[in-house]
Amino acid sequence: GNSVTQMEGPVTLSEEAFLTINCTYTATGYPSLFWYVQYPGEGLQLLLKATKADDKGSNKGFEATYRKETTSFHLEKGSVQVSDSAVYFCALRRGAGKSTFGDGTTLTVKP
Amino acid sequence: EAGVAQSPRYKIIEKRQSVAFWCNPISGHATLYWYQQILGQGPKLLIQFQNNGVVDDSQLPKDRFSAERLKGVDSTLKIQPAKLEDSAVYLCASSLVTSGVTDEQYFGPGTRLTVT
């Protein structure tokens, strides 16, 4: 079956540091890949997505590239801010079916 | 555009009691999902509806959980009787259905259930 593995957290960075959160997946066929963010006390929000191999999703300074050869979709940001502190979830989905999520990575950014 | 609405936001019950959660998806969204998110884990699908029909309920503990989506709009998820391990956040999500396309899922704020 489908599965998503994220790097374990928590991750603590200083403001303006470079961020990488690793995500690898196992799936049949060609799923779409997503990163969601969950701020304290709020619901899941879509951060970015990529629907086919070599696509790059980007939003709010975050980027992730769909790498079929390494089955990966690592999240990166060049300079994090305190406001980026949240839990980040990698997920995959095919068509209108369910999303399969990783277990989340907690990011804390200190001033 | 209004988002996915859920109520209540928080619920505390004792084990063996029953509880119900309500979800109103975004207007026009044919597909509705209920996920269970246990602390420290990612959300896991309990049940998926398309209009008022069940698409996937393979992970729903049917001896205690039930869900319905009458008239293909809002939905209720019920637990009866609750167990301690049901303590989690219950997320509702909705999406349009476009054949061959992966539409975005929109998530509600969730209902945090604590079973004591």
Image (tube, grey):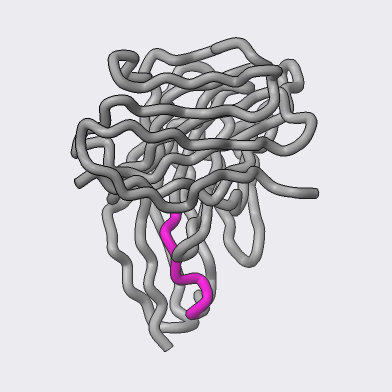
Query: Which residue ends up furthest to the bottom in the rendered image?
Result: A111
Q: Nearer the viewer, residue A30 or B12?
A: B12
Determine whether, in the image, residue B18 is placed left or right of residue A93: left
Judge whether residue A102 can be spotted in this image: no
Q: Where is residue A72 in the image (x, y as percent from the top left)?
A: 44, 40
Q: Position of residue B18 (x, y in %)?
A: 33, 31
Q: Nearer the viewer, residue A107 or A38?
A: A38
Q: Where is residue B90 in the image (x, y as percent from the top left)?
A: 43, 40
Q: Residue at x 35, y 28 (%)?
A: B79
Relative vertical location of residue B30 with respect to residue A59 in this rendering, above or below: above
Relative vertical location of residue A106 with respect to residue B76 in this rendering, above or below: below
Judge whether residue A41 can be spotted in this image: yes
Q: Which of A39 and A3 is in front in this view?
A: A39
Q: Where is residue A74 in the image (x, y as percent from the top left)?
A: 46, 50
Q: Which of B8 and A57 is in front in this view?
A: B8
Q: Residue at x 62, y 45 (%)?
A: B5
Report the label total. Answer: 0
Determine whether, in the image, residue B19 is placed left or right of residue A73: left
Does A42 appear in magenta?
Answer: no
What's the magenta region?
A82-88
Relative vertical location of residue B87 with respect to residue B102 in this rendering, above or below: below
Q: Residue at x 54, y 36 (%)?
A: B22
Relative vertical location of residue A87 with respect to residue B32 in this rendering, above or below: below
The quadrant in which residue B20 appears is: top left
Q: Which residue is drawn at 54% across and 19% down?
A: B68
